[in-house]
């Protein structure tokens, strides 16, 4: 396979949470038809009969002639050229467990912002290692983009990352609408880790807000988070990259500030005094930062990058350190 994507390449969405639903909406603005793997019978029936996902972003109405929802993963994948992974990272393995057809001839795009737990690898690394895919047939779609705003057609920027810029542009054209603008990059490693780290920092910001810290401190916490992210990328995988671009800094900012952010909400609940267990139980959507805090700690044991903010989040989430004490200690390490 030469890994060149043709403009007529057919897309399949894997997952039916809020991000999968938002991306499917965007794709169907341009694509005559997309495949869609939906495991949940209630969601499947509703998408087929009413063109609506009853569980996530139920405000979105799909043109039913443009979606092909199915609970047959093999069929959905067989009929596609581009497979878009959009389930939470923690359920990726479970989501793909019924797949028996090979992915070797496909282009696989991750829309996931998390680490595969237990494996301690990013989604791109996981697909490369376990499905024998070349990095040339793997990509990312990301950016500061809450599903809720995308569903309301509020202007958002997405970045497509592939090793081959021509492939990025072919994919990007499929997502370009009046309310979605595209950027492109080849920094697979840096952007994927940025999407993971920003979730941990948003948990830290939520904690600080919940504890009663003000805007002045939040600005310091977020600017230090941006530096910590850049330091991790520089020291773990040096490359020419502009970490102030929207796929890095922009995504960090939106996740730290937006009321839609699930990671910020998790931190907020803990800052307000919930136990970690109660806060997780309270969440109705996935906060990837919870899993990422543990995974990054594990991965960073190799790189030994100074990460006081990620360490603080880990200590609170996994070691039972009281959040007020941990945040107080962190304040002595920020500049
Ligand atoms: N939401 C957003 O704005 C954005 C999200 N992302 C990323 O997209 C990815 C998906 O997140 P998002 O769509 O928001 O998640 P949601 O919380 O909206 O949806 C979670 C999905 O996971 C499924 N799920 C829950 N528990 C299990 C389980 N035990 N086994 C299998 N599947 C399960 C849910 O199915 P069910 O309802 O049946 O339980 C649902 O389809 C994440 O990596 C996130 O970081 C990226 C950009 C923006
Ligand atoms: O990645 C996101 C926005 O760009 C979504 O962040 P949350 O998962 O914290 O809601």
Image (cartoon, helix red, strand yellow):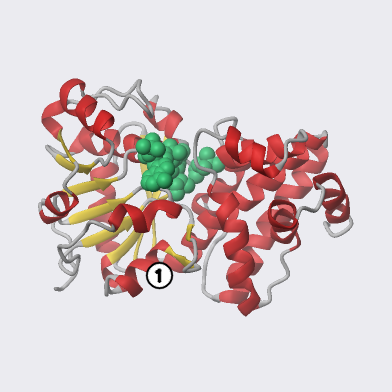
Horizontal side of 76 relative to 52 (left or right) equals: left
Horizontal side of 2 relative to 225 (left or right) equals: left
Q: Quadrant of residue 83?
A: bottom left
Instruction: Give the position of the N terminus as an image quadrant.
Output: bottom left
Identify which residue is drawn at 17% across, 25% down: 63
Horizontal side of 302 relative to 123 (left or right) equals: right
Horizontal side of 133 relative to 118 (left or right) equals: left
Q: Is the CB atom of the residue marked by disc 1 within 8 angstroms of ligand 1's nearest atom? A: no
Which residue is at the front of the view, 236 or 266? 266
Q: Quadrant of residue 295?
A: bottom right
Instruction: Give the position of the C terminus as an image quadrant.
Output: bottom right
Identify which residue is drawn at 57% across, 59% down: 243
Q: Position of residue 92 (x, y in %)?
A: 37, 55
Note whether 103 is above or below 273 in the view shown: below
Identify which residue is drawn at 26% across, 24% down: 52
Q: Position of residue 156 (x, y in %)?
A: 43, 37
Q: Ligand 1 lies in which image quarter?
A: top left
Q: Position of residue 2 (x, y in %)?
A: 16, 73
Note whether 122 is above or below 208 in the view shown: below
Residue extending farthest to the bottom is 302
Which residue is at the front of the view, 49 or 256? 49
Res 190 visible: yes
Note whether 296 is above or below 28 in the view shown: below
SS for tag 1?
helix
Which residue is at the front of the view, 272 or 63? 272
Note whether 254 is above or below 308 in the view shown: above
Q: Position of residue 309 (x, y in %)?
A: 73, 57
Which residue is at the front of the view, 232 or 17? 17
Identify which residue is drawn at 22% across, 32% down: 44
Res 249 visible: no
Disc 1 target residue: 125
Q: Would you call the spot at circle 1 few (<14 residues within 10 Å), some (14-19), or many (20 or more)?
A: many
């Amino acid at each position: 396979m030469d890994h060149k994507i043709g403009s007529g390449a057919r897309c399949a969405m894997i997952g039916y949470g809020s991000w999968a639903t938002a991306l499917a909406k965007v794709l169907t603005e341009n694509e005559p038809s997309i495949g869609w793997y939906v495991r949940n019978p209630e969601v499947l029936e509703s998408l087929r009969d009413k063109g609506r996902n009853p569980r996530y972003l139920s405000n979105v109405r799909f043109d039913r002639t443009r979606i092909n929802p199915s609970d047959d993963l093999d069929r959905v994948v067989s009929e596609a050229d581009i497979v878009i992974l959009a389930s939470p990272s923690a359920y990726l393995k479970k989501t793909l467990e019924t797949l028996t057809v090979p992915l070797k001839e496909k282009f696989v795009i991750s829309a996931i912002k998390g680490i595969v737990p237990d494996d301690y690898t990013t989604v791109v690394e996981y697909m490369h290692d376990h499905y024998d895919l070349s990095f040339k047939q793997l990509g990312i779609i990301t950016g500061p983009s809450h599903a809720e705003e995308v569903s309301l057609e509020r202007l958002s920027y997405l970045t497509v990352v592939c090793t081959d810029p021509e492939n990025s542009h072919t994919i990007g054209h499929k997502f370009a609408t009046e309310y979605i603008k595209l950027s492109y990059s080849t920094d697979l490693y840096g952007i994927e880790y940025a999407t993971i780290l920003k979730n941990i920092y948003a948990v830290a910001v939520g904690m600080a807000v919940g504890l009663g810290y003000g805007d002045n401190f939040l600005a310091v916490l977020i600017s230090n988070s941006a530096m910590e992210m850049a330091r991790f990328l520089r020291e773990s995988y040096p490359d020419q990259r502009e970490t102030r671009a929207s796929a890095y800094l922009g995504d960090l900012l939106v996740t730290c500030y937006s009321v839609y952010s699930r990671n910020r909400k998790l931190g907020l609940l803990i800052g307000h005094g919930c136990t970690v267990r109660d806060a997780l139980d309270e969440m109705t959507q996935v906060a990837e930062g919870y899993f990422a805090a543990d995974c990054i700690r594990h991965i960073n044991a190799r790189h030994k990058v100074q990460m006081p903010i990620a360490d603080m989040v880990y200590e609170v989430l996994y070691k039972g350190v009281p959040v007020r004490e941990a945040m107080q200690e962190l304040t002595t390490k920020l500049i």
